Image: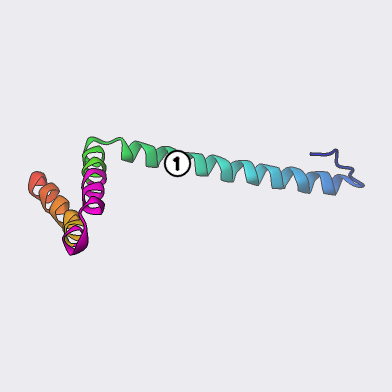
Amino acid sequence: MGTKKYSSYEQIDRELEILKIEKEISLQKLHLEIQGVKQNLEPKNLVKNTVKGIMGSYSTNIPGPYGKVFGLAIPFITKWIFKKRGR
């Protein structure tokens, strides 16, 4: 970044206001990212994502229509398992 030249204090104030808003936006994005990481690290979501990953890899390794059916059935099966555990 080069050095900016300003011709008035209003330009400097405007630039500072823009930087302040950009900083606030960055902090909000960081906060949302942290919340997402916290949610992904919950035990329920860790297991769910692991099962999805494992089953997804199996469905892509099974050739033909069986692999496609298996890949479509996995989300329903995992949802059913987690609903049953929540009772």
Residue that label 1 marks: 33
User: In the figure, residue 9 lies in which quadrant?
Assistant: top right
Please state if 27 lies on the left or on the right of 7 as rendered: left
The residue stretch that appears in magenta: 52-68
Q: Nearer the viewer, residue 46 or 86?
A: 46
Based on the picture, tell me whether residue 58 belongs to the magenta stretch: yes
Callout 1: helix, strand or loop?
helix
Residue 4 in percent (x, y) is at 86, 42
Disc 1 marks a residue whose amino acid type is Glu
> Residue 56 in the image: x percent, y percent?
25, 50
Residue at the image position 24 percent from the left and 50 percent from the top: 61
- The spot of residue 55 in percent (x, y) is 21, 48
Looking at the rendering, in which quadrant would you find the N terminus? top right
Q: Nearer the viewer, residue 70 or 26?
A: 70
Q: Would you identify the image quadrant in which residue 86 lies? A: top left
Main SS of residues in magenta: helix
Q: Position of residue 3 (x, y in %)?
A: 85, 38
Compared across the picture, whether 36 is left or right of 70 comes to right
Disc 1 packing (10 Å; few <14; some 14–19; many ≥20): few
Residue sticking out furthest to the bottom: 65
Indicate the colouring scheme: rainbow
**Residue 48 vs residue 17: left or right?**
left
Q: Is residue 57 magenta?
A: yes
Seen at 22% across and 53% down, the residue is 59
The total of numbered circles placed on residues is 1
In the picture, measured across the screen, residue 39 lies left or right of residue 68, that is: right
